[in-house]
């Protein structure tokens, strides 16, 4: 047997030992192995969700650079019916974001493995909710009542698991004092009654902003992050946000 052949045999034996060890660990500690797999899968799903939101942000930026006004951006799609109908969008479709109507972004729903199943009956469960109702303190022109210019175009993913929100916060806006999730001070987006999706209008409504309850620096000026609700959404509801357009 040549030296190369002996080396190959040794490599095969070593791989076999590693695989046997991994199998033995999985058999002896199925709970630990499953927990590790679940965490890795959750991390991957979070990354995919955030990348999708960032892809939408990029699409909005490109449409703006190509001459679309901030009220002309349309998220209308065949999959969402009339939810995002925008009467200000050009008939040519040049300001459409979603692929079914000529835009670059395919329609998706949120993977339910990231969501709190106890809230599955809520109207925004499983959706990427885009609205012109909310401002983020510290970016663009801060909103003042009576002037909608300070309202951002924001994507929200409501009803996340707490563990998912914590993982997002740790990589974006950061955690609050005591390593707790930041909590919005008042109203981030409409959950009582009908949600308000973006249809080309930035709404002058006082109190709708992303602003941390006790430590404003955690959320102020952030383009993305995750927080617990306080009013709307209520306490116990965890939401990811991505600013699509600063105003």
Image (spheres, grey):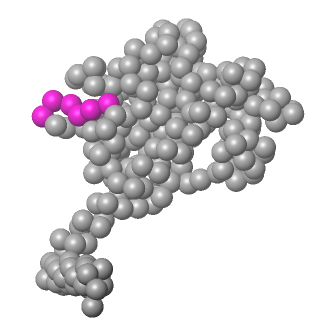
Residue 202 in the magenta stretch? The answer is no
Q: Is residue 231 above or below residue 46?
A: above
Q: Residue at x 78, y 26 (%)?
A: 88
Q: Quadrant of residue 210?
A: top left
Instruction: Classify the position of the C terminus by image quarter.
Output: top right
Residue 10 rendering spot, x and y as whole percentages: 22, 82
Q: Is residue 229 visible?
A: no
Left or right: residue 101 versus residue 70 is: right
Q: Is residue 185 above or below residue 146?
A: below
Residue 86 rendering spot, x and y as whole percentages: 74, 33
* The residue stretch that appears in magenta: 173-178
Q: Nearer the viewer, residue 12 or 133?
A: 12
Q: Is residue 95 above or below residue 106?
A: above
Judged by its main secondary structure, the magenta piece is loop
Left or right: residue 146 versus residue 160 is: right
Residue 176 in the magenta stretch? The answer is yes
Q: Quadrant of residue 185?
A: top left
Instruction: Classify the position of the N terminus by image quarter.
Output: bottom left
Residue 138 rendering spot, x and y as whole percentages: 40, 14
């Amino acid at each position: 047997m040549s030296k190369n052949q002996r080396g190959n045999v040794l490599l095969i034996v070593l791989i076999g030992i590693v695989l046997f060890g991994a199998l033995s660990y999985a058999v002896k500690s199925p709970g630990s192995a499953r927990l590790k797999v679940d965490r890795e899968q959750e991390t991957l799903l979070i990354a995919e969700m955030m990348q999708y939101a960032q892809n939408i942000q990029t699409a909005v930026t490109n449409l703006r650079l190509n001459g679309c006004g901030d009220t002309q951006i349309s998220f209308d799609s065949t999959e969402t019916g009339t939810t995002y109908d925008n009467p200000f969008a050009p008939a040519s479709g040049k300001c459409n974001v979603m692929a079914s109507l000529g835009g670059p972004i395919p329609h998706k729903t949120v993977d339910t493995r990231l969501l709190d199943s106890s809230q599955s009956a809520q109207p925004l469960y499983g959706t990427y909710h885009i609205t012109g109702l909310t401002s983020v303190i510290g970016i663009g022109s801060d909103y003042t009542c009576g002037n909608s210019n300070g309202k951002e175009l924001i994507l929200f993913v409501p009803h996340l698991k707490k563990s998912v929100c914590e993982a997002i916060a740790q990589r974006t806006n950061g955690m609050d004092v005591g390593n707790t999730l930041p909590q919005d001070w008042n109203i981030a987006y409409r959950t009582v009654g009908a949600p308000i999706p973006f249809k080309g209008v930035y709404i002058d409504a006082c109190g709708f902003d992303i602003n941390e309850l006790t430590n404003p620096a955690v959320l102020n000026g952030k383009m993305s992050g995750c927080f617990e609700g306080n009013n709307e959404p209520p306490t116990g509801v965890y939401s990811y946000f991505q600013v699509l357009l600063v105003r």
